[in-house]
Amino acid sequence: MTIHLLRHGRTEANEKGIFCGSSDVPLSAGGIIELETLKKQGIYPKAESGYTSGLQRAKDTARLIYGNIPFRAVDDLNEYDFGIFELQSFEDIKDRADFQLWVNDESGESMCPGGESQREFVQRVLNGFNSIIDETRRSGADSALIVCHGGVIVRIMQHLFPDNDDYFQWQPDNGHGYSISLSPEPPQILNQF
């Protein structure tokens, strides 16, 4: 089975460098143009089934690239909930004690005020991912495409490739992603697109 993980196109939040996880922001004008250009280059894989997170930027990315092919929304694949840090820049919040507590937490237990902990996020994402794998296997399909978010892709890649947990290595640029073979095991990266 092959799984394709595609990060949504750019948003204004991406362009401005602000925390945007659970906020349902749209693609930016530049992000739409970039996706259309990449689509013309033919970089995007085909798959037998498609999934997105429940957020508009992921659903719009799927529609722009794949047209009216049906994609099922899986809310467990939504981006991290930054709580009160949502739509704030690092500069805006870097000196806050609650931000420092969260950002320096190595246990994954510290929650963003009003948001979730890293441990909760990872568990949620893996629940969603595993449900897609199970559904794809039950259907007899050989491939599935997931259009989601950078943080979600990182956590899936860290799960599939536990010997390398470098967060920034696994995060693809907007509009890019990975094709991964899950069988035979162990998982193998087939392509970066």
Image: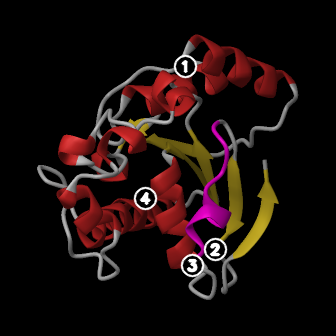
Q: Amino acid at mark 4?
A: Ile
Farthest front residue in view:
95
Quadrant where the image shows the N terminus: bottom right
Q: Is residue 22 magenta?
A: no
What distance separates the C-alpha of mark 3 from that of mark 2? 18 Å
Which of the 4 image quadrants contains residue 63? top right
Residue depth check, mark 3 versus mark 2: number of the one nearer the observer = 3
Q: Earlier in the sequence, mark 4 or mark 2?
A: 4
Figure check: 56 above or below 122: above
Picture residue at 61% right of the left edge, 62% below the top: 168
Count residues near mark 3 (Cα–Cα under 10 Å), then give few for <14, some for 14-19, many for 20+: some
Picture residue at 29% right of the left edge, 82% below the top: 107
What distance separates the C-alpha of mark 2 from that of mark 1? 27 Å
Q: Which residues are magenta?
A: 165-174
Is 105 positioned to the left or the right of 42 in the image? left
Q: Amino acid at mark 2?
A: Leu
